[in-house]
């Protein structure tokens, strides 16, 4: 049985990271752009965390690394132009923000908002 460790919340074996990114670059002369469904694509990825204790800084840091990696993969190539890179950055930030919100872990949220330093593994 796969479960996530949590206090008082239902167990979730994985979080679904969703990213919506523009498939077409927005023209630089457009002041406010509304994109059609044809110009948008949505990609999703499941991230398992049943092996982590999100109530510890170590577990939250590992989960944050997984979410960041998944957001990068889900948003695709950052592109070459400034407009493409801005779209990618927006996709990455939105995907990561939403995933952290869905996990609903106080330590993960604090880490995401820069309130806790990331824990790194140390070798002897």
Image: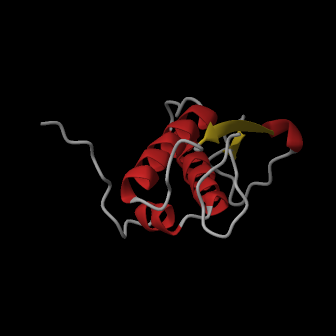
Residue at image point 44% right, 68% down? 110
For the residue pair 26 and 4, the one nearer the viewer reads as 4
Q: How many marks?
A: 0
Residue at image point 44% right, 51% down? 59
Colour logic = secondary structure
Q: Where, quadrant-wise, is the N terminus in this rendering?
A: top right
Q: Position of residue 24 (x, y in %)?
A: 71, 35
Q: Position of residue 105 (x, y in %)?
A: 55, 64
Asked where in the image residue 18 lies, by quadrant, the reply is top right
Q: Position of residue 11 (x, y in %)?
A: 70, 55
Above or below, 11 against 37 in this view is below
For the residue pair 118 and 21, the one nearer the viewer reads as 118
Q: Is residue 24 left or right of residue 71?
A: right
Asked where in the image residue 76 lies, by quadrant, the reply is top right
Above or below, 55 against 76 in this view is below
Q: Is residue 75 left or right of residue 106?
A: right
Pick out the residue farthest to the right.
37
Above or below, 28 against 75 in this view is below
């Amino acid at each position: 049985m796969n479960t996530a460790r949590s206090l008082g919340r239902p167990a979730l074996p994985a979080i679904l990271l969703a990213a919506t990114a523009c498939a077409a670059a927005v023209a630089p002369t457009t002041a406010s752009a509304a994109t059609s469904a044809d110009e948008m694509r949505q990609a999703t990825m499941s991230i398992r965390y049943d092996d982590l204790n999100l109530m510890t800084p170590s577990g939250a840091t590992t989960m944050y690394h997984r979410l960041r990696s998944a957001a990068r993969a889900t948003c695709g190539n950052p592109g070459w132009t400034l407009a493409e890179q801005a779209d990618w950055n927006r996709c990455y930030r939105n995907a990561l923000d939403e995933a952290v919100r869905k996990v609903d872990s106080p330590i993960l949220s604090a880490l995401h908002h820069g309130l806790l330093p990331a824990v790194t593994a140390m070798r002897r």
